[in-house]
């Protein structure tokens, strides 16, 4: 009982808990037009289905912080939504799924510099 209490207290004190990134959840977010409260009806998948427009070297060119900024820019500009927490669970899941997309054989290396949406 004491152990459980300690565990619960520890969980409460840790605030925003980020669990391991989940690519399956990321897929749902990638295909959701309401990610970030999107209002245009677009999801990431509307324009980037199967990794289209994303370079296979995406994760080598950008660190997670700059990639999160690009993604949030996309949410605001193309989906009419609001930026999500760059270090939050949704962002981690989204990136985990995007990693599975860009490492597919038919996604090419980025031929030119892309600034984002
Ligand atoms: C309305 C279409 C559209 C939507 C919706 C959209 N994007 Fe994009 N995105 C683009 C275009 C166009 C580019 C630039 C690609 C190019 O120049 O070839 C881009 C670029 C990017 C890049 C940079 C690619 C690179 O290799 O440097 C990332 C990352 C990205 N988008 C992620 C997302 C994510 C994540 C979402 C959903 C939250 C999203 N995009 C929604 C059209 C869109």
Image: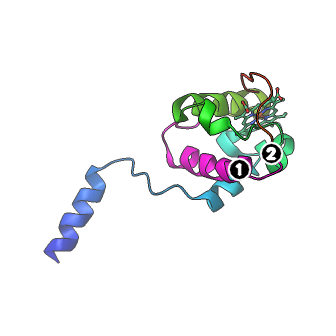
Question: Taking the image as drawn, is residue 83 in sight?
Answer: no
Please provide percent x and percent y for residue 27: 70, 56
Q: Secondary structure at mark 2?
A: loop
**Crowding near the residue tagged with mark 2, few <14, some 14–19, many ≥20 C-alpha atoms within 10 Å:** some
Mark 1–mark 2 CB contact (< 8 Å): yes
**CA neighbours of label 1 inside 10 A, class few (<14), some (14 to 19), many (20+):** some
Viewport quadrant of the C terminus? top right
**Residue 103 is one of the magenta-drawn residues:** yes
User: Residue at the location (65% across, 49% down)?
Assistant: 99
Provide residue 36's location: percent of width, then percent of height: 65, 40
Q: Tell whether 30 sits left or right of 92.
A: right
The stretch of residues the image draws in magenta is 83-107
| Residue 77 location (% of width, % of height) | 75, 26
Image quarter where the N terminus lies is bottom left
Residue receiving disc 1: 103
- Asked if the residue at label 1 sits under 8 Å from ligand 1, the reply is no
Q: Residue furthest bottom?
A: 1
Q: CA distance from mark 1 to mark 2?
A: 7 Å
* Quadrant observed for ligand 1 in the rendered image: top right
Residue 43 versus residue 7 in the image, above or below: above
Camera-side residue: 103 or 117?
Answer: 103
Q: Who is closer to the viewer here, 68 or 9?
A: 68
Query: In the picture provided, is 106 more to the left or to the right than 100?
Result: right
Q: Which residue is mark 2?
A: 107
Secondary structure beneath label 1: loop
């Amino acid at each position: 009982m004491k152990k459980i209490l300690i565990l619960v207290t520890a969980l409460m004190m840790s605030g925003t808990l980020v669990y391991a990134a989940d690519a399956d959840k990321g897929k749902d977010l990638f295909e959701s037009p309401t990610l970030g409260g999107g209002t245009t009806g677009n999801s990431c998948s509307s324009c980037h289905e199967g990794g289209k427009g994303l370079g296979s070297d995406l994760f080598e060119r950008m660190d997670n912080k700059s990639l999160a900024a690009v993604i949030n820019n996309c949410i605001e500009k193309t989906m009419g939504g609001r930026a999500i927490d760059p270090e939050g669970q949704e962002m981690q899941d989204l990136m985990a799924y995007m990693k599975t997309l860009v490492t597919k054989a038919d996604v090419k290396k980025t031929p030119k510099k892309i600034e984002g949406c």
